[in-house]
Amino acid sequence: MFTIGCHLSASKGFLAMGQTALSLGANTFQFFTRNPRGSKAKELDSKDVAAFLAFARENHFGTLLAHAPYTINPCSDRPEVREFARMTLADDLGRMEYLPGNLYNFHPGSHVGQGVETGISLIAETLNEILFPEQQTTVLLETMAGKGSEVGSHFEELREILNRVTLSEKIGVCLDTCHVSDGGYDIVGDLDGVLTQFDKVIGLTRLKAIHINDSKNPLGAHKDRHEKIGEGSIGTEAFARIINHPALRELPFLLETPNELPGYAAEIALLKSLRKDG
Ligand code: FE
Ligand code: FE
Ligand code: ZN
């Protein structure tokens, strides 16, 4: 199955997101668990969640991707900032149990000058505090562009985090095409080589989702500016290879491109037209 969707606003609830996704030609979507700038999460409406789960089943939806607010920083140098990240992640993971079997993605964090080693330790510490044996959600570390002091722009850094997490089977990776290209991995010229490297360092079994974004900047720019599919430095042909690659094709693909809904519908249609059967 080709599982394809885009980031949607969660303001009208889960059933509304499901209906919007379907109207765009999607069979999954990504949503922020709360305001992306942090702050309080809305109470979950159990009727809305139940209606959505039935709707998703009827319409053969694939795995969903929840995204943590991007302002949390589990490896800040300030204890109160780390504590806020820990509380937010723990609260989100608890709420994700109402949507069992899905994915929860977060940005590992920025070490703000403490060094990558310290950053990795603090991130793993946070994960060891929030993961629980019964959880039905897989938590994903997102590959980052390496902007500022971001941790996670090298596969080795993600591997180091994985090595230190006790409930390791609860953790996976989400590969963002814009971020890895900005991070210096040549997915346009050498997709096979990048995936071989990913497999050696992290293991392809850890890869659970793809953020499918073009980039406004060239390979290795460390900028993180997403572009519409086919309008950036990655380009349509590379995306055709990515969505059809045997190691990737069964994963959920989520667009985070600068689009309103009609733009997303057009990109979903384009990617479907590039998808090869079998
Ligand atoms: Fe992200
Ligand atoms: Fe992303
Ligand atoms: Zn990004």
Image (cartoon, rainbow, N blue to C red):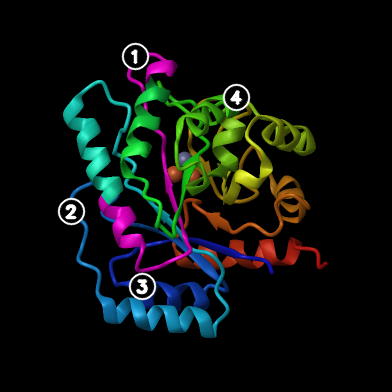
Give the quadrant of the C terminus.
Answer: bottom right
- Judge depth for marks 4 and 1 and give the one in front: 1
Residue 37 appears left or right of 114: left
The earlier-in-sequence mark between 1 and 3 is 3
**Residue that mark 1 sits on:** 113
Name the element at disc 2: loop
Regarding residue 216, the answer to whether it shows in the image is: no
For the N terminus, the image quarter is bottom right
State the mark number for residue 14. 3
Q: Are marks 4 and 1 in contact (CB under 8 Å)?
A: no
Which amino acid does the dot numbered 1 rest on? Gly
Lower position in the chain sequence, tag 4 or tag 3: 3
Question: Tag 4: residue type?
Answer: Gly
Of callouts 4 and 1, the N-terminal one: 1
Q: CA distance from mark 4 to mark 1?
A: 21 Å
Quick one: label 4, few (<14), some, or many (20+) residues within 10 Å? some
Instruction: Quote the CA–CA distance across marks 4 and 3.
Output: 37 Å
The residue wearing badge 2 is: 40
Tell me if the residue at label 4 has its CB under 8 Å from ligand 3: no
Label 2 close to label 1 by CB (< 8 Å): no
Near-viewer residue (54 or 217): 54
Label 3's element?
Answer: helix
The magenta-colored residue range is 91-118
Residue shown at 20%/39% (left/top)? 84
- Residue 185 location, x and y as percent? 66, 29
Inspect the image, locate mark 2, and give the three-letter code of the amino acid beneath it.
Lys
